[in-house]
Image: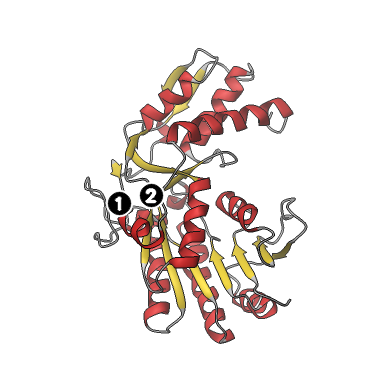
Amino acid sequence: MSGEITVVTGAAGFVGGYLIERLAGRSPLVGWHRPGSPPPRTASSIAWTAVDITDRTAVFGAIEESRPSRVFHLAGAANVGESWRTSGQHLRANALGTHHLLSAVRVAARPCRVLVVSSALIYRPTDIPLDEGAALGPASPYGFSKLAQDQLALRAAHEDHLDVVVARPFNQIGPRQSAAFALSNFARQLARIEARLDASALSVGNLDARRDIIDVRDVVTAYERLMANGVAGRAYNVCSGHAWRIRDLLDEMLRASTAHVRVAIDPTRLRPTDVPVVQGRARRIHEETGWSPTIPVEQSVRDMLDWWRGEVASGAIS
């Protein structure tokens, strides 16, 4: 391939899908997806390639073939709740996969800027809003795997002198999100109840947790700004700066519903460890790139519900 190539790892995922939609047509674009599953239907300008991020040979070969000038590294295991059962998988995908990618970029020895997407869950739990200098101390296997990824990326910048920027996103929601995530799961249940496919009881976990939540469409804008203006070797929170109680967001969804719903706590949805409050500060990214979120969380919640209604109406879910 020739020209300024952009690679997006994890391009078939929730956030990756929105990112490639935003980037399509601007420069030659290569999307990595997991082997064994077909790539999504997207613009014909996107070149898809199957890459197992945990396979060193596959990662090195893919970087050598595309010779990118930019890499948005989104690939990895992303389910916090599942990480208690699949901690090894999370470590391989998030830590080892990032190690392979950064090593491949280093060996390629050509100019390439890499945005590594870490997580806010690398921080030590606290009630105080978190800035990028907050103490690190994950409370889940997922968080530990992302901490390893985060530190590998910063080391690559400071010691190997690679052009690497780190994003630390907080909770992301929006249409097309997997029902494995709480608010999207609520929206799916509610859409099925409205369609009379389920009884009127909506199953939930801990509704008292408070989370800093942003819309996925704002998130990909932040990633684009960081790729353009972020400082190499620097980490940036991607957050709203406000922590919403999950119960309040569920109430917003219920107000938008046409159904009368009973909410029921399901003990199986409760995590072994659930941090009460996760709230960030976004001063650094705002001051250095000009980014701020623009989509109200209430709109995000309603858009998710509308998307699941469409999925139910189309028969995409039974």
Using residue 101 as the reference point, say whether residue 289 is left or right of it: left
Q: Residue 161 — which label? A: none
Q: Residue most toward the top?
A: 260
Quadrant location, the N terminus: bottom right
Residue 224 in view: yes
**Residue 164 point in image, percent of width and height:** 45, 73
Quadrant location, the C terminus: top right
Residue 230 sits in quarter: bottom left
Residue to which mark 1 is pinned: 281
Residue 20 sits in quarter: bottom right
What is the spatial separation of the Cα atoms under label 1 and label 2, in whole angstroms? Answer: 7 Å
Using residue 135 as the reference point, say whether residue 207 is left or right of it: right
- Secondary-structure class at tag 2: loop
Between discs 1 and 2, the one toward the N terminus: 2
Residue to which mark 2 is pinned: 239
Q: How many marks?
A: 2
Residue 229 sits in quarter: bottom left
Amino acid under disc 1: Arg
Using residue 72 as the reference point, say whether residue 205 is left or right of it: left
Amino acid under disc 2: Cys
Q: Residue at x 44, y 36 (%)?
A: 296
Closest to the observer: 7 or 277? 7
Q: Residue at x 70, y 25 (%)?
A: 313
Closest to the observer: 174 or 217? 217
**Residue 81 point in image, percent of width and height:** 44, 46
**Residue 94 point in image, percent of width and height:** 48, 63
